[in-house]
């Protein structure tokens, strides 16, 4: 989990405050730091919307703040740490620090059954149905995981038993049969869907397994936070001091 602490040298601002109001400084400082952290989070989200390709609401909501208090004069901006799920998982740290992204939830499940190697990641194939963000659809991911029985036992999603797999492969008179299979070797490593029709079988690449790339940092989070702090903290501090002193009995 990324963490950036926002602290500020208050000596210059303290000199502007009369001695009689010094007991209000911790409250004003904590309030100003928290407001500045919130503004920094908004600025980072704007950078994410500008630099990322169709970021999902989940990705844009992955930032949160830890407010400052009178006894802890620093506010923190975090990237949420999320447990693996079939369709999500923390995977944006490399955008802030570089390196390799973490596995998505379904990639971790495919690794657990030996389909995906440790130095690989899965990308949508040409036959996959994509959502509005360019990712393979959640329904298709769940169908693949169910076919290969990759869902954890006791989970909310069911794996297919032999009878269900056979029924899906044969299909019905109204629906073509389909099955998934795993190609383990060659440049076409990945998961494919074979769709049987009256004219033969169509093969569709669903998930292709490729070597995990190393990403360059795209958002300089400390730089964004420093810029927001320098621009806004002094005015937030003065406003907080005014608020504290005006309500003081």
Image: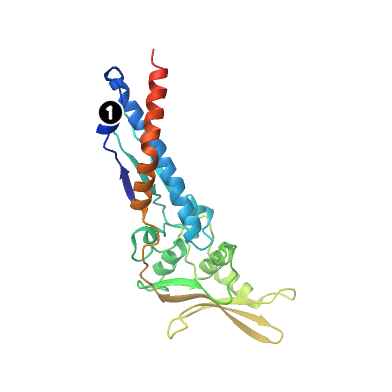
Whole-percent x and y of residue 120?
39, 73
Q: Is residue 248 visible?
A: yes
Number of on-image labels: 1
Quick check: 180 above or below 22? Answer: below
Tell which residue pokes out farthest to the right in this image: 174
Residue at 34 percent across and 63 percent down: it is 98
Whole-percent x and y of residue 7?
29, 40
Quick check: 31 above or below 163? Answer: above
Quarter of the rendering occupied by the C terminus: top left
Quick check: 39 above or below 201? Answer: above
Indicate left or right for 127 with 152 as reference.
right
Residue at 62 percent across and 73 percent down: it is 168
Closer to the camera, 248 or 65? Answer: 248
- Residue 27 sits in which quadrant? top left
Whole-percent x and y of residue 72?
29, 33
- Residue 140 sits in which quadrant? bottom right
Rate crowding at label 1 as few (under 14), some (14 to 19) or many (20 or more) other CA atoms within 10 Å: some
Local secondary structure at mark 1: helix
Q: Which residue is mark 1?
A: 14
Residue at 28 percent across and 28 percent down: it is 14
What's the image's color scheme?
Answer: rainbow
Whole-percent x and y of residue 207?
51, 74
Closer to the camera, 18 or 218? Answer: 18
């Amino acid at each position: 989990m990324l963490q950036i602490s926002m602290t500020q040298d208050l000596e210059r601002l303290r000199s502007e405050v009369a001695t009689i109001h010094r007991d209000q400084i911790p409250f004003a400082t904590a309030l100003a730091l928290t407001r500045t952290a919130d503004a920094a989070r908004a600025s980072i989200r704007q950078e994410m919307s500008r630099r990322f390709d169709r970021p999902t609401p989940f990705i844009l909501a992955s930032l949160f703040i830890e407010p400052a208090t009178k006894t802890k004069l620093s506010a923190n901006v975090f990237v949420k740490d999320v447990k693996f799920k079939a369709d999500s998982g923390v995977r944006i740290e490399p955008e802030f620090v570089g390196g390799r992204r973490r596995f998505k939830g379904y990639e971790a499940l495919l690794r657990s059954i030996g389909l995906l190697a440790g130095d690989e990641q899965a990308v949508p194939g040409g036959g996959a149905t994509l959502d509005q963000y360019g990712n393979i659809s959640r329904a298709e991911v769940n169908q693949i995981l169910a076919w290969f029985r990759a869902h954890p036992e006791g989970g909310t999603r069911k794996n297919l038993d032999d009878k269900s797999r056979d029924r899906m492969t044969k299909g019905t008179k109204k629906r073509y049969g389909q099955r998934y299979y795993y190609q383990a070797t060659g440049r076409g490593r990945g998961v494919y869907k074979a769709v049987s029709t009256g004219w033969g079988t169509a093969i569709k690449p669903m998930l292709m397994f490729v070597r995990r790339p190393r990403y360059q940092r795209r958002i300089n989070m400390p730089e964004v936070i420093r810029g927001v702090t320098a621009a806004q903290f002094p005015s937030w501090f003065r406003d907080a001091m005014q608020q504290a002193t005006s309500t003081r009995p």
